[in-house]
Amino acid sequence: MAPRPFRRRMECTAYCSCGYCCNWEWGLNVFPGRYLALLPRAPLLALRRARPSGHAPGRKWQLLDKYWTATPLRGEPYLGLTATETEPTQARRGLLHPTTWADPKRLLWRAVLPWRLLGRVGTVAADPEHLAFGTQLHVPGHGWCRVEDTGGDILGPTRLDLFYHSHADALRWGRRTPEVLVVPPGASRVDRLPGPVRGVARVADAVKHALY
């Protein structure tokens, strides 16, 4: 049976790409196979083991770099990518959505960079055992997002972690339990259309996300 969209109440937390949320730290590469970690509090410096990156083996040496601290990748350079090796993005409503006009200051800032007036599908971390990569989700109060990442604490069918660029915005979201629309891969209305019109419908769907 083909997958179908469904709704489920889910516990949604938020994270950003800061060192606290994503378990990385700055390090100075001044010793072979080691780096000098720059700590936010005493003792301020710590010598740690550096490991070659399994995700980017040809990555160039850098004097100042970011390193994983509390995951199986500990000691490897932190690339800032998701589990599917994409750049994480924050969900954003388009210019025509009513919530876009609810914050005039933010709207003015977005107008300074015109491309930021366009909507965007965001990144969400989920348990891939329950929500496959590529699953689309509509989270009320946040927007449309796509499962592209995982997390050690994001386990089970009712846990999500929403990506925000700002740590302050992530804290502002906090922890909520909205009813989420879940669209598994291949389950959207566009995917169920006949082949000849599917491409046109996908373009129209992308325009809708960009404007609304």
Image: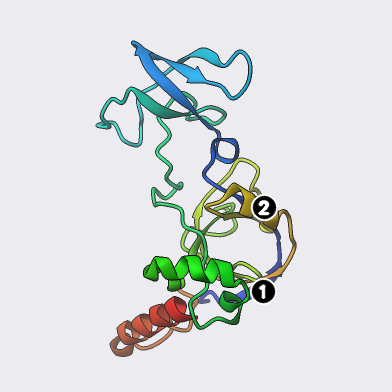
At horizontal 57% and vertical 16% (from top left) the residue drawn is 44
Q: Position of residue 60 (x, y in %)?
A: 25, 29
Structural crowding at the residue carrying mark 2, measured as other residues with C-alpha within 10 Å and reported as few (<14), some (14–19) or many (≥20): few
Amino acid under disc 2: Gly
Residue type at numbered disc 1: Arg
Residue beneath label 1, please?
Answer: 7
Q: Which residue is mark 2?
A: 156
Question: Up-down: is 121 above or below 47?
Answer: below
Rendering coords of residue 3 (x, y %): 53, 74
| Label whose residue precedes the other's in the sequence (2 or 1) | 1
Q: Crowdedness of circle 1 by 10 Å Cα count: few (<14), some, many (20+)?
A: few
- Mark 2 → mark 1, Cα distance in angstroms: 16 Å
Q: Provide the secondary structure element on which disc 2 rests.
A: loop
Q: Is residue 97 left or right of residue 141?
A: left
Instruction: Give how far across and how far down residue 83 sits, in percent.
Output: 46, 46
Apparent side of residue 12 relative to residue 50 in the rendered image (left or right): right
Q: Residue at x 71, y 62 (%)?
A: 10
Residue in the foreground of this view, choosing between 88 and 94: 94
Residue nearest the viewer, comparing 45 with 89: 45
Name the residue at 46% across, 53% down: 88
Residue 127 point in image, percent of width and height: 59, 52
